[in-house]
Image (cartoon, rainbow, N blue to C red):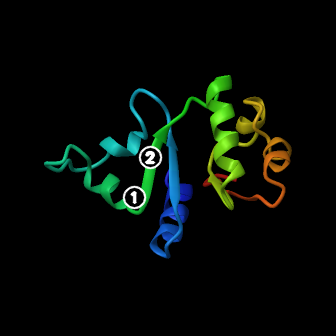
Amino acid sequence: MLAAPFCAGIRGDFGAEIIKVEIPGGGDPFRRFGPMTETGASLNWLNEARNKKSITLDLRKPAGAALLKRLVADCDILVENFRAGTRKRWGLGFDVLKAVKPDLILVRISAYG
């Protein structure tokens, strides 16, 4: 839950444009984790979300997957921390994304192997 956002955040600290994809409805659960501030966001979220733009996409649906492919076409690096096989089940395996962006770098982080 935190490894990929932390990794992307560091890239943002060095000037990379970061687009964070969140689930529709409630967004990233980390938004509500920890002490809340007057802004309505938690202190943890304000730190984790720094230097990022956020959008919501349901990657399980064709429209969400199609929009992610459009974003991938214009990006250099995709950082994710889904469980193994999740993107592939959604039709967004590395082979599919590599076809959209041949020089795509995929950083896959798993906290538990």
Toward the bottom, the furthest residue is: 14
**Label 2: few (<14), some or many (≥20) within 10 Å?**
some
Element type at marker 2?
Answer: strand
Left or right of 108 in this view: 4:
left
**Image location of residue 77, percent across then percent down:** 67, 60
Q: Which residue is mark 1?
A: 48
Residue 99: x, y in percent? 85, 46
Mark nearer the viewer, 2 or 1: 2
Instruction: Return the x and y of residue 80 as percentages of the image width and height.
Output: 63, 51
The residue at the point 78 percent across, 45 percent down is 97
Earlier residue among tags 2 and 1 = 1
Task: Check disc 1 and give the amino acid type.
Answer: Glu
- The answer to which of 40 and 110 lies nearer the viewer is 40
In the image, 35 versus 15, the foreground residue is 15
* Residue 53 position (above or below residue 55): below
Q: Residue at x 63, y 46 (%)?
A: 71
Percent of width and height locating residue 29: 40, 39
| Residue 43 drawn above or below residue 36 | below
Label 1 crowd (10 A; few <14 / some 14-19 / many >=20): some
The amino acid type found where label 2 is placed reads Ser
Q: Are marks 2 and 1 in contact (CB under 8 Å)?
A: no
Residue 52 falls in image quadrant: bottom left
Distance between mark 2 and mark 1 Cα atoms: 12 Å
Report the residue marked by disc 2: 54
Q: Secondary structure at mark 1?
A: helix
Q: Residue at x 71, y 50 (%)?
A: 73
